[in-house]
Image (spheres, helix red, strand yellow):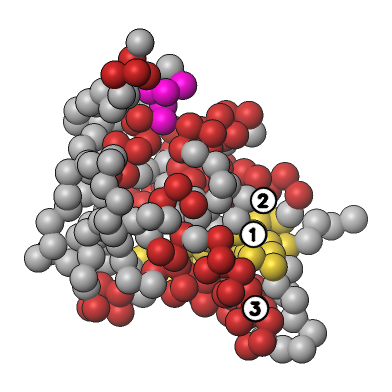
Amino acid sequence: MSKELSVVALSGGMDSCVTAAIAAKKFEVAALHINYGQRTQRRELKAFNDIADFYGVERRLVIDFTHLSAIGGSSLTDEKVKVSKANLTNKEIPTSYVPFRNANILSAAVSWAEVLKATRIFIGAVYEDSSGYPDCRPDFFEAFEKAVNLGTKPETTIKIETPIIHLSKAEIIKKGLELNAPLDLTWSCYQNEDEACGVCDSCALRLRAFQQLGIEDPIPYKVRPNYLTDEEKR
């Protein structure tokens, strides 16, 4: 019997890669990637294609959301907003927040899923990020799924899956290693495309998680600060 089809939002980052690995265990994967004028757009697109190649994904869709760049307001899309250095204790919304990005991504995924008759949409949102990114909260995805059921054909049923939403970054890495996910093909840095900077929020979260596990992160970094707390170093 053929597997059910799922659409996976695949940015090329570590979280989306592990999410794709989870989806690929049970579903045929159609991979969706969004270019939205982010600083590392070309590098993320390469990571998307490398990961899709790894899983033998034939159905791929790359969409240019130029409106998110035109709107701006984020250090990822707006040159006037600087990429802030890592502050892992910060509870405020960081400058890297792209206003309502996940809703834009999900809307495209739903449109494609309805045409493909896919039954699931997988997205690698993490609740740990929700203090900074309000569109990473579980109740946001629950509400969006209700909107999908109201706004699609009566015969369309699409479930939004967020399989890593309650995991820490270290747990996500462990899950990825268990599934033999190609973490070496992923890209997380917010500002560099050759060597990861090591000092933006995304690099810091990723490096700290690998350091907590005592594992070397397989991607190249310009610098690799130690982000462990004094207690974790003991």
Residue type, numbered disc 3: Lys
> Is residue 146 positioned above or below 191 on the image?
below
What is the x, y in percent for residue 169? 46, 38
Distance in Å between CA atoms under marks 2 and 1: 9 Å
Q: Considering only vertical position in the picture, is 88 above or below 140?
A: above
What stretch of residues is rendered in magenta? 209-213
Q: Is residue 157 left or right of residue 42?
A: right
What distance separates the C-alpha of mark 3 from that of mark 1? 13 Å
Q: Secondary structure at mark 2?
A: helix
Instruction: Specify which label sits upstream in the sequence, 3 or 2.
Output: 2
* Residue appearing at x 72%, y 89% in the figure: 153
> Residue 151 location in percent, x, y?
63, 88
Task: Let me know if residue 205 is in the magenta part.
Answer: no
Provide the major secondary structure of the magenta segment.
helix
N-terminal label among 2 and 1:
2
> How many discs mark residues in the rendered view?
3
Camera-nearest residue between 187 and 99: 99
> Residue 23, labelled with which disc?
2
The Cα–Cα distance between marks 3 and 2, rounded to whole angstroms, is: 21 Å
Q: Nearer the viewer, mark 2 or mark 1?
A: 1
CB contact under 8 Å: marks 2 and 1:
yes
Q: Secondary structure at mark 3?
A: helix
At label 1, counting other C-alpha atoms closer than 10 Å, the crowd grade (few under 14, some 14-19, many 20 or more) is: many
The residue singled out by tag 3 in the image is 146
Viewer-nearest of labels 3 and 1? 3
Mark 3 and mark 1 lie on one chain; the one further toward the N terminus is: 3
Mark 1 lies on residue: 161
Q: Secondary structure at mark 1?
A: strand
- Identify which amino acid the numbered label 2 is placed on: Ala
Residue 41 is situated, as x and y percent measured from the top left of the image, at 30, 58
